[in-house]
Image (tube, helix red, strand yellow):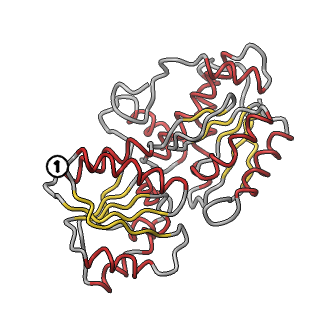
Amino acid sequence: MKVGVLIDIDMGTKEDFLATLRFGFDEAHAEGVITRPVELVVKEAIGLPRLEAKNTIDGYLALAAEGVLCVIGPLITDNSIALAPVIDRTGVPAVTWTGTDRYHGQYCFNLGNGGLAEEAAIMAAWIRRRGYTTVGMIHEISPGGVEYASNFRYYAARARLDVLIEAYTTQVPDDLEGVLRKIRDQRPDCLAYLGYGYPTILMAPMFRNLGWDPPRIMTSAFQFCYAKPEWMAALEGWYGIDQMCEENPRLGPMLDRFAAHLGKRRDHTVTALSYDTTRLIAEGLARAPLLTPAGVKDGLERVRMLPAVNGGPRTH
């Protein structure tokens, strides 16, 4: 059974990501959840924010032409929004990790790596819980950034936070240090970053140049730190949103099994979410009344109460 993988992100850990997907499908096959093995058909199609959405759309259409039953991806919010109408017209279901409310359709499925509304609420609550009352807000000029910012304004008001300044950046910024300087000069208690997050990995030397080391929190873009060692170093000092919870009794055993399989440990959210994605699709394949893309769509719609390794102890 062919399952497509649409990689629309510069993924420094691509081979580990694919290994996790194969591992999850192989376990589902060994357990008898599915009676036939899964073959991954991989298409790298880097789109927004660095390149063009058309690249990701073309990648999805190429996977559909190769006869996949469903697609894992895209993984980026902007590309998910652009691709949603194409997915419905083409009729090959896609399971994304997007956090936006704007990705929806008959063939559009989502196992969100966070959520643009939920993350904004968590960030505002964290700021208030730490005793801060004023915040400098920076958000990206992008669909995801605008949606994040709208939600953060609401939850900041609910938490009785004063947003002293709203500053903006593109996803590939020209004068990011100037933006940070404007925020610093307003002297907020802390900094909140709202967006997909590429600019945050550029900020460390800018904070040093400005002589400014504010308490700072960001969205699930924080998980960039798992992709490359240099990105982890670049995000030193940030707090961020994550989904993995060590108290989930299913998480540790899965990570141990995968480490034994891979020969190295990859204990982070991308591993957990990748595994959950395979188990969701395996259930959808098992419940499909017919092994066609439309049948798999019907099967995915029937999945309920599937235990997850990502999230807290009772996450399904």
Between residue 23 and residue 50, name the one nearer to us.
50
Toward the bottom, the furthest residue is: 209
The relative height of residue 250 versus residue 222 in the rendered view (above or below) is above
Q: Residue at x 44, y 42 (%)?
A: 115
Q: Could you tell me which residue is drawn at 80 percent across and 23 percent down?
A: 292
Residue 270 vs 23, above or below: the answer is: below
Q: Label 1 crowding class (10 Å Cα cut-off): few <14, some 14-19, many 20+?
A: few
Q: Is residue 79 above or below residue 111?
A: below
Residue named by callout 1: 129
Residue projecting furthest to the top? 289
Q: Residue furthest left?
A: 131
Camera-nearest residue between 202 and 229 = 202
Seen from the viewer's position, the closer of residues 100 and 283 is 100
The residue that appears at 39% across and 27% down in the rendered structure is 315
The quarter in which the C terminus is drawn is top left
Residue 63 placement: quadrant:
top right
